[in-house]
Image (cartoon, rainbow, N blue to C red):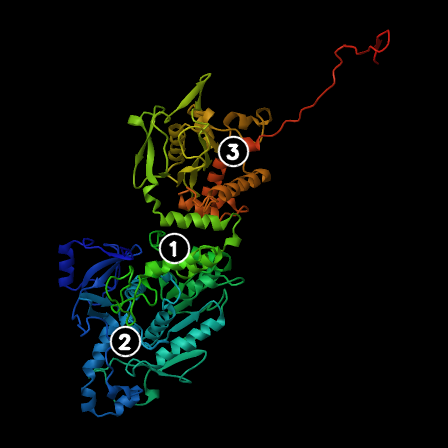
Amino acid sequence: MYKQTLYKILPDHIKPKVLKRINRYKKWEYGYNDEHDMVVISRTGEIGEVYEIQNLKIALPKAQEVHEFKENRWTLFDYPKELKRIKTVFDWREYPEDFKEKYYDYIDNEFKRREEGFWYINKDIPTYLTGTHYMYLQWSKIDVGQPDFRESNRLFFIFWEACRADSRCYGMSYLKNRRSGFSFMASGECVNMATISTDARFGILSKSGSDAKKMFTDKVVPISVNYPFFFKPIQDGMDRPKTELAYRVPASKFTRRSITSLDKAEDLAGLDTTIDWKNTGDNAYDGEKLKLLVHDESGKWERPNNILNNWRVTKTTLRLGSKVIGKCMMGSTSNALDKGGANFKKLYYDSDVTKRNSNGQTRSGLYSLFIPMEWNYEGYIDSYGVPVFDTPNKATKDPHGTPIKIGVIEYWQNEVDGLKGDQDGLNEFYRQFPRTEEHAFRDEAKSSLFNLTKIYEQIDWNADSKINNTVTQGNFQWVNGVKDSSVIFTPNSSGRFFISWIPSSNLQNKLIIKQGTKYPGNEHMGAFGCDSYDISGTVDGRGSNGALHGLTKFSMENHPPNHFFLEYIARPQTAEIFFEDVLMACIFYGMPILCENNKPRLLYYFKRRGYRGYSMNRPDKIYNKLSVTEREIGGIPNSSEDIKQAHAAAIESYIDEYIGLKVNGNYGDMYFQRTLEDWAKFNINNRTTHDASISSGLAIMACNKNKYRPNPVVERKVYDLGIKKFNNKGSMSKIIQ
């Protein structure tokens, strides 16, 4: 059975005594709580459960006044017919007091739910809706009428409320599947916030100006028009404007105390709040002050438009000095990487809540959220709003009474299987309906230097075959901590090494000593490639990783041939830790290493420790043609264009022969997803960001060093040995001149 992992409840995040004490005095404040590292979204002063959604801890309100619907699920509340006829606050004031008296409590209650949220029983479970989510379900009109309750949307709105509450946050970057309802939810929030804000500006951007306009006219305006009179301010201009929605007269909270005798529009203070849209461009909304920016289809901005440039500009519209005064609700599926997807991908990963600067903000200022397609796929959500992951063994219906016969996981897999012969079609399906972040950012096969079809075949096969049982994570260490003795491998869930094969015990730590120099004893079995670094730390903490890969070659030993058996992509606290890691791996496997010598500290480290024999010389030159430094420490330069081309060709050849679906019908045995993904996006003109590709390519070159060995030019000279040739015809022999 499929297990949900979208969120988890943290029962012990706050000590029970502390929770009880602060709840008693209702002292929990809405916003970020530094002491408990969580965002409180309760406006009542009391909190209940603490959720963790995509590493963000969110404290929900304590359950109060839990409503029970007859059908044990969300049901739309009836809007009294008498109130339906009332269109404006001025119409309301014309009614007699005894009529209004009947509806004061109803109206008050709606305002309370809007502000504090709403608790109800869903499938026998107390369920919390934020105020925004309640407004969306109860009062927003969408293309199919009223929205259905979905558990995925509930979690989306809880996360969004946390983004609103957190003073460190500029909003959210939501990576979604197609038809997830984001545009309507964002439009609903836009209207919800605008109708309670004064002197505020709300903006809409999309992948094109026409898309932004369509969102405004087809989603925002109808939601606003269909609000009940007690939530809807009087607006300027047309009922259904095309460019700007302007709210002038506010809707007040209707209570006996707040009702006044004023009945003229000019006597009421205006909201001075507008909602509009802009054409797509880097400088859209530049210089303005926004309360909310809705950013739709952010992953589809194609050149010359650039979402990164636009966000750098619009981010300034949401702050005043260091204070965040507005929020951005950004959501999109992703295009192919060269069609706007790469920029959105960077923005999404720059919004990781676990990576913050000293001010507590993410690199982008936003918080990233990804909801897999199985949580939010239309037609596979039951009447309680819960996804039907597995094929049901009893009758299950969607909110409209349509039977659900198979689970969404099976449906999705059937679609994938049907597209296996069309890699670009499959990648497009993955981007539209992703189950992982990697799916969402799949690239087109034609855009890669290498055979992307084969790479993705391997990635998908690895994912389907659950390679966790094949790959072991851990670290190498010296026996009893004694250096230069024997090395052992210790499994560790936080280790830096990932390995899929180790040699038999008689082949481990095998070395040969020639004339006092140590050489690897298993050179005939394989080799390592390494992309090293020299500096322990960088100013911004963003230095590239050190990378090490081990690859076997064909031999008579009992081991898998042409198999990548080790992956190491990490940057330990010091360069020396990295050097020692690499050395121990080489010694344990008894294999040589080919390393780039433009960062020579690793190679000098090997020589100083007495392991120069483990460092391979560059295979494209004979020994007497090597430079003094190359003879001293070995290694291969990365500056030569010939080397770059040979390196890329080595990876290309390996992929074509050993990756993905092979001629014999079997799949390759390359299990390291990070390396496969690095190959997929490898750029030969910008190699510095591809540590895994550099390292793995060098390992391939090391195992095939004979291919690169130069053929020496042999000069043949004719020497006179003094031996004469004779012609013996006739009676006398004569010397042949």
Q: Residue at x 23, y 70 (%)?
A: 116
Mark 1 or 3, closer to the camera: 3
- Residue 437 numbered tag: 1
Residue at the front extreme?
730
| Quadrant occupied by the C terminus | top right
Whether residue 139 is situated above or below residue 172 in the rendered picture: below
- Amino acid type at mark 2: Gln
- Quadrant of the rendered image containing residue 205: bottom left
Front residue of 620 and 632: 620
Whether residue 120 is situated above or below residue 584 in the rendered picture: below
Front residue of 85 and 605: 85
Q: Is residue 241 visible?
A: yes
Work out how far the residue at label 1 is from the one at label 3, CA to CA, in angstroms: 35 Å
Horizontal and vertical percent position of residue 65: 16, 71
Asked whether disc 2 touches disc 3, contact meaning CB atoms under 8 Å apart, the reply is: no
- Identify the residue position indicated by label 2 in the image: 138
Mark 2 or 3, closer to the camera: 3
Whether residue 17 sits left or right of residue 481 in the image: it is left
- Identify the residue position indicated by label 3 in the image: 704
- Amino acid type at mark 3: Asn
